[in-house]
Amino acid sequence: MEYVSTRDKSRKVSAAKAIATGIAPDGGLYCPTTFPLLAQEDWKSLLAMDYKARAAFVLGKYLTDFTAEELSDFAAKAYADDKFGGADTAPVVKLADGKYLLELWHGPTCAFKDMALQMLPHLLTASLRKTGETRTACILVATSGDTGKAALDGFANVPGTKIMVYYPVDGVSTIQKLQMVTQEGANVSVCAIRGNFDDAQSAVKRIFTDKATADKLDRQGMTLSSANSINWGRLAPQIAYYISAYCDMVTRGEIALGDPINVCVPTGNFGNILAAYFAKNMGLPVHKFICASNRNNVLTDFFANGAYDRNRDFFTTASPSMDILISSNLERLLFYVSGQNDKVVADLMGRLSTEGRYALTEELFANVRADFDAGCCDDVQTAHTIRTLFEDEHYLADTHTAVAVKVYEDYRARTGDVTPTVIASTASPFKFCQSVIEALGGTVTTDGVELLNQLSSLTGVPAPAPLAALRGKQPRFDRVVDKADILATTDLLATL
Ligand SMILES: *Cc1c(COP(=O)(O)O)cnc(C)c1O
């Protein structure tokens, strides 16, 4: 299978090259030029498989320069039962009114990013090998919370890699910080940046574009690499769980093979929902995608009127992983709905970078509307949803998942569409204890790892094992730097 840049189709590369380089040299994102179709026979085999086999099967349709043995081996390691707390890697939980919660947070860091970041290190190291790269890959990550820990856990002690995570000193939850600073592994390091997430992100971008740093690392046998969600190696592993959820619903008799479903996703960078779009184009019968946003509702407006406009206030919300004004992966959707028109995409992205906005033509917008619906809700509605879900259905949801549930309920009321709907549940509620305790009407009386206990006693729900294990772990990293001093932190890489 061939991959091309969304901004210049003449750049054709293999899957390994797309994963090894992350982003195309023209700033575009690598996309497969065809969607591999799942035949009736494929579905029959998928129904009988466990999650690991389904993941390897779906990846095999896209990563044609990897062998089936390689992919099975990677899936066995990435989704090992001891990492995901059992064999049900991504369970589907049925609630009232057509809601099927697809829980994607049973991995080692309790966020859906584990589904991709446990797989990426295997794909990346193999891709580097296949493309002739011999230097050690140094992964730099700026995080608003979930990505940092998931990347640390995925890359810890992976031969041929080192990883350095930068987080905003006051921008992550108590539990998220504890998760990062206690990370084990000889090849990992963590550094707090004074400032907010944008400061951390732009500081990391400075490292990536600094020629002197690249040269110095090269002399020491190292090269910089990224694990962020525009890398095809992070998107591809996410396609499998939608297909797996559908198979589970069929085997449980909730639906028959071929019946339509809707998919509702709490969205930030548009990676998770785009993976569902790939699944649909492979043959998953999806009626509508419902894109859920918090108060940072740039995508809700986009799906309502066809204009993307980032010139607006930025809000800090209770669902911080969705606090984002530029949803990078939307570029890939534009590529496909325009019939793989690289000129159109390059033009729209040019406008986004110079004017901060662009508008779709009538025709393009109609193509987008055919598949997508969208909605948003604020922190008050999010908290109310957490409380009702718990009181009415005894389901404890995190803030991101609650946004999706609320947006789905609004969609169902507005349209009358009662198609069974898979809602992505993207984080354990125990990662956001303060917000969840307050949503349930409690008052936060503890701090640190004790927050887990408070939420447990309030709800009777035990904290996930990886979070409970934070108790008694010693912090390993306490470095805090000004963003101006970030370049010097790369000297640490040589010591790992
Ligand atoms: C990253 C994240 C999201 C947003 O996912 P995208 O792929 O960026 O749209 C939603 N919820 C949680 C908990 C996350 O960590």
Image (cartoon, grey):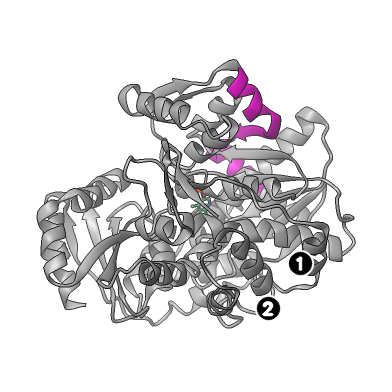
Q: Residue at the spot x=61%, y=53% of the render?
A: 440
Q: Is residue 65 above or below residue 359?
A: below
Q: Residue at the spot x=61%, y=78% of the render?
A: 85
Alpha carbons under labels 2 and 1: distance apart? 16 Å
Residue 186's image quarter? bottom left
Q: Are marks 2 and 1 in contact (CB under 8 Å)?
A: no
- Quadrant of the snapshot with the N terminus: bottom right
Q: Residue at the spot x=56%, y=61% of the render?
A: 237
Q: Amino acid at mark 1?
A: Leu
The residue singled out by tag 2 in the image is 87
Judged left or right of residue 439, residue 132 is left
Across and down, in percent, residue 146 comes to 44, 59
Judged left or right of residue 419, residue 410 is left
The residue singled out by tag 1 in the image is 46
Tag 1 or tag 2, which sits nearer the N-term? 1
Q: Nearer the viewer, mark 2 or mark 1?
A: 1
Who is closer to the viewer here, 295 or 164?
Answer: 164
